[in-house]
Image (cartoon, helix red, strand yellow):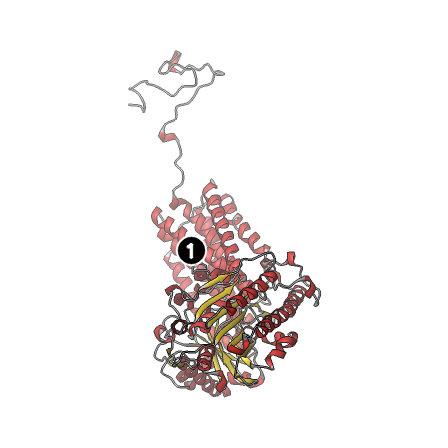
Amino acid sequence: MRPGGESGGGNRVNAPGQVNGGSGAGGRPMSWWRGREWPLQTPSTVPAPPSVAERFPLLVTVQVGAALLLFLHFLTAMRPTEFAWTFTYPWILEAALAGHLLGPLVATMVFPSGRATFRLFGLLPPLALALVQAANALVLHQLVWWVFALGAGLLWGVWAIQLRLARGRPGWALALAGVNQVGLGLAYVAVVFFIVTRARLGLHHLLDLQVGGNIDAMGPARHLVLVTIGQVAAYSLGVLAVVGWWPRLLRLAPPPDSLLLAGAIALGCGWLSFDLLAERQPVEEYLQFRYHLDGVPHPWPRRFRHPALAAALAPSLPVRRESVWRQGRFRLPDPAPTANVVIVRVESWRADLAQSLMPKLRAWAARGVWLERHHAQANMSVPSNLSLHYGIFPWLHTRFVAAGYPSVWLQTLASAGYRLSCVMSPEDSMPVPNLPLIVVPKRGKEWKAARDVLDTALEVWRQPGPVFLDTYLYVTHFNYFFPPAYERFTPVVPDDGVDYTMLLNMDPDLLARMTNRYRNCLLYLDDLLDEFLRRAETAGLLERSFVLIIGDHGEAFGENGHFAHGTGPQRVQFHVPALLLGPGLSPRRVTGFTQHLDVIPTLAALLGIAATGLPGRNVLEGGHDHLLTLDLAAPERLVLRRADRMTLFNLPPDGQLNWVLTTDPEFDLPPHLYEWYRPAGIASLAAAVAQDRAAALQMLGGSEEP
């Protein structure tokens, strides 16, 4: 029986106009269209499209190749001297990611046999990586090459294992391809984020995209992450389209067990070579490695295997989120306070430049309490604002914001009859649910919005009854806004020339012109604040109000290669101006450390409200000899600061405080600290780490006393 008819004949698919089922001499179909026949098409003659499992070797090879390029570019950004021969950002990275597709595609034509492609992709990479490891151990002696060899080896192992898992399993192939593409997208976002900010992309950056209005508070990070996610989506669609359209397959058998075993042994030998390489590194080189790659698993080097340091870093009782998030307890006096409380928060306000460029602010400081060494609790807005309005350390701040807790401090003021208001422009976010917002519409340039915000704040301040008024000025945020009349530091990047993409190419000339924009912005801010305070004084508001003018965090302009904020532990990203004015306050300067955690205890004392259970203190009684800050340049990065040093810790969600490194406050390594990392000085380093760790745990509600 033939398909479609009876034995010996039957119907056929005919050309247009042909009689169905008819036949001419010899049984051949009759065709009147140019005398040509229309052949019979049956299911057996139509080639089936390749399955997902058959296309998977080509797709996974493309994906792992892209991952290797991203990994190499991350190392290039971290250590450009060792990888000077590689490409530079921004555009070459995209070109390399798109161009690497040609390699596997060409291989399907040049190496049609499975044996040839196995030699190219299955045998050559592990041999090359073994040679790199040997050359590094004998000649190069570079930790970054150690990371490259192990990372590339692991990528090859992932490639080989996935080939095995997906062979003959379309479901596995589809799932693995999806997971790979998502991971590749996150890696691309993380690499670009590091290149621009010198910070590691953490979960908090991605969560900020989903939490309330916090996306605006991310500043450059927000725009960077959003644009990069769009690029990732376009690239992913391109990869799937190319691989799905390409007619040839990459015929690859999974590497045999013997080759996988040899690769595992090579990785193990590379892991053990870390000690040899670490001992050959100068101290500052190894500390740079620890700072940038402390999240990369690596052996504990021999130089730190000291009993005193081991004791200093021994596991302690874990820090509990409930202890860190516990707000204070307040008791109102009788009668209740009636003085107004006004806070003016200034975005990205750097203390040293404010001191030198704002003479009118200095004149007001002579009339109040000037906090010379005040530090924000974090180098980004949202966590810093949590410390100001809740009095808590902002560990795991995105989870705290998502929980929607009200401020007990503000609840106390509201129960005393205070009207609560926050006046801000649309760019700000205020993650305090019981602080009512007054959003001032933006009209034209941002520098105009700043004046409108202060005008609205004065109107709220003038209303009868005690008021708690929080006012936020965005004018000093990147792009650094000012009217043309204040362009006194030149040259500057013009208003229409400022774009977040310039962060990708911050050369010295561009950095100087952006710094001039910031200087001009401070000149304008000086006049804004002076006019605001004078109008309040004329209206008789200052004599019955406590006014705090404070920066939410600082700003970096090239210090240690960092720009903007949320990009590193440098002092300039945390040190902010802070001025307290009010009735009965004698002019003075507080020279000790103060921090955002001290704001609520200080205001409570001025209002006669008893406050307990807070980690901060009343600054009128003196400052601290140390303080704890949150560095958003890395996930869960804490910085314990003293006058002569700072110690970096990681505090992951499990609550174990892990030491990273100890440097001077400017993130440098002067001679006396350099000696701590030599064998004879490890005991001194251990004593300092133990002291700083105990102080940090005590501030976080732990059991250890400093």
Q: Residue at point 37% right, 67% down? A: 405
The one nearer the camera, 330 or 635, is 330
Q: Quadrant of residue 535?
A: bottom right
Quadrant in the picture for the C terminus: bottom left
**Left or right: 252 with respect to 355?**
left
Q: Residue at point 38% right, 42% down? A: 51
x and y percentages locating residue 519 in the rendered image: 65, 69
Residue 280 seen from this side = yes
The crowd level at tag 1 (other Cα within 10 Å; few <14, some 14-19, many 20+) is many
The one nearer the camera, 479 or 205, is 479
x and y percentages locating residue 336 in the rendered image: 40, 78
**Left or right: 119 with respect to 576?**
left
Q: How many marks?
A: 1
Quadrant in the picture for the N terminus: top left
Q: Residue at point 39% right, 71% down? A: 411
Q: Residue lying at the far top in this picture: please name it.
A: 25
x and y percentages locating residue 118 in the rendered image: 45, 51
x and y percentages locating residue 686 in the rendered image: 45, 85
Instruction: Give the amino acid at mark 1.
Output: Trp
Q: Quadrant of residue 417?
A: bottom left
Q: Quadrant of residue 511?
A: bottom right
Q: Secondary structure at mark 1?
A: helix
The one nearer the camera, 22 or 331, is 331
Q: According to the image, label 1 marks what residue?
A: 159
Residue 632 seen from this side = no
